[in-house]
Image: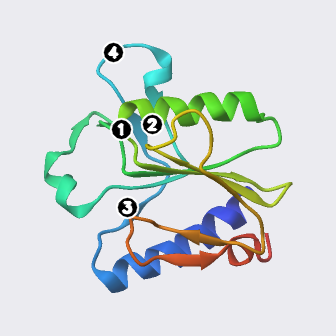
């Protein structure tokens, strides 16, 4: 199910980004969110996106990208729990990630986290709702049901 959801996100979002010439979606990349050596500063979202204007500023250190992506998509596993994923979303926000989508496959919901609400998701989307790229990917919308289709 995780692979199917990742493919659905990639197909839908990548096609939009390519058509709009907004850059490209990254697969599971490792981000060193801060130069500290703390374990929690190294995270690997399922998918991520960096705005094209920020790409020249991105530094790679070995196999890590130093700094935050603009969008992090985390597809949870059956052994992930809300407190753990909330903590991870907060770490992303503190590092400067602007938009986070935490996907819960078994419940078919997506938690939307944004900078303006660092303590809790700004929305919890269900299959009848629409996912929005907001100001990170302007104009992108997608029915949540399309993300969970055939997953």
Viewer-proximal residue, 124 or 15? Answer: 124
Between disc 3 and disc 2, whose residue precedes? 2
Q: Residue 96 carries which label?
A: 1
- Mark 4 / mark 3, whichever is N-terminal: 4
Q: Where is residue 18 in the image (x, y as percent from the top left)?
A: 35, 80
Residue at (40, 43) in percent of width and height? 97
Query: Circle 4 is placed at which residue position?
Result: 36
Q: Dot 3 corresponds to which residue?
A: 136
Residue 14 in the image: state x and y as whole percent: 45, 74
> Judging from the image, what secondary structure is the residue with disc 3 in?
loop
The residue that label 2 is drawn on is 93
How far apart are the two marked residues, 1 and 4, measured between alpha carbons?
Answer: 15 Å
Q: In which quarter of the image is residue 127?
A: bottom right
Element marked by disc 4: loop
Question: Callout 4: 10 Å neighbours few (<14), some, many (20+)?
Answer: few
The residue under the point 59% across, 50% down is 122
How far from the left and from the top, in percent, is residue 120? 62, 38
């Amino acid at each position: 199910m995780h692979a199917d959801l990742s493919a659905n996100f990639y197909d839908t979002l990548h096609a939009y980004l390519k058509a709009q010439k907004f850059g490209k979606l990254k697969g599971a990349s490792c981000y060193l969110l801060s130069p500290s050596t703390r374990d929690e500063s190294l995270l690997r979202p399922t998918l991520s996106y960096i705005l094209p204007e920020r790409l020249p500023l991105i530094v790679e250190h070995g196999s890590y990208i130093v700094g935050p992506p603009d969008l992090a998509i985390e597809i949870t596993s059956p052994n992930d729990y809300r407190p753990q994923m909330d903590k991870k979303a907060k770490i992303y926000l503190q590092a400067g990630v602007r938009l986070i989508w935490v996907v819960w496959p078994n419940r078919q919901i997506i938690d939307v986290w944004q900078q303006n609400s660092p303590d809790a998701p700004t929305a919890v989307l269900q299959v009848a709702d629409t996912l929005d790229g907001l100001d990170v990917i302007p104009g992108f919308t997608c029915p949540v049901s399309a993300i969970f289709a055939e997953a």
